[in-house]
């Protein structure tokens, strides 16, 4: 497992290289010399979290939970438009 460290500037200028490096191991992204973020492959994320479903499965997931949703009412006032 290769560990790569990049500054925020290097990451912004070489995102493709960072993504390729993440396939071989974690990529530490520093901000002012201090570790701030870690980039890992999605497969590694799934391995670490024990998550075996993909994003499509997660979005289509059925739940027996009764979720109440009452959005706040929106007031839209019409405005006169001058087309002259």
Image (cartoon, grey):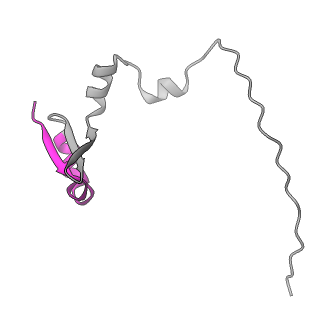
Closer to the camera in the image, 26 or 35: 35
Q: Which residues are magenta?
A: 1-21
The vertical placement of 71 against 54, above or below, is below
Quarter of the picture holding the N terminus: top left
Q: Is residue 69 magenta?
A: no
User: Residue shown at 45%/29% (left/top)?
Assistant: 55
Check the image and name the residue furthest to the left: 2
Q: Could you say which quadrant of the image residue 48 lies in? A: top left
Give residue 34's position: percent from left, percent from top. Answer: 22, 46
Which SS does the magenta portion mostly show?
Answer: helix
Residue at 23% across / 51% down in the picture? 16
Question: Compared to 44, does 14 lie above or below?
Answer: below
Question: Compared with residue 43, is residue 4 higher up or lower down, i.e. above or below?
Answer: below
On screen, residue 12 versus residue 61, left or right, reads left
Answer left or right for 31 relative to 77.
left
Residue, far top: 64
Q: Residue at x 31, y 31 (%)?
A: 42
* Percent position of residue 45, x then y: 30, 27
């Amino acid at each position: 497992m290769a560990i790569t460290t990049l500054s925020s500037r290097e990451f912004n200028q070489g995102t493709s290289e960072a993504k390729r490096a993440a396939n071989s191991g974690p990529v530490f992204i520093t901000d002012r010399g201090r570790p701030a973020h870690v980039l890992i492959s999605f497969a590694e994320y799934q391995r670490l979290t024990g998550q075996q479903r993909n994003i499509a499965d997660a979005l289509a997931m059925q739940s027996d939970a009764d979720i109440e949703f009452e959005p706040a009412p929106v007031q839209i006032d019409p405005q006169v438009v001058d087309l002259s």
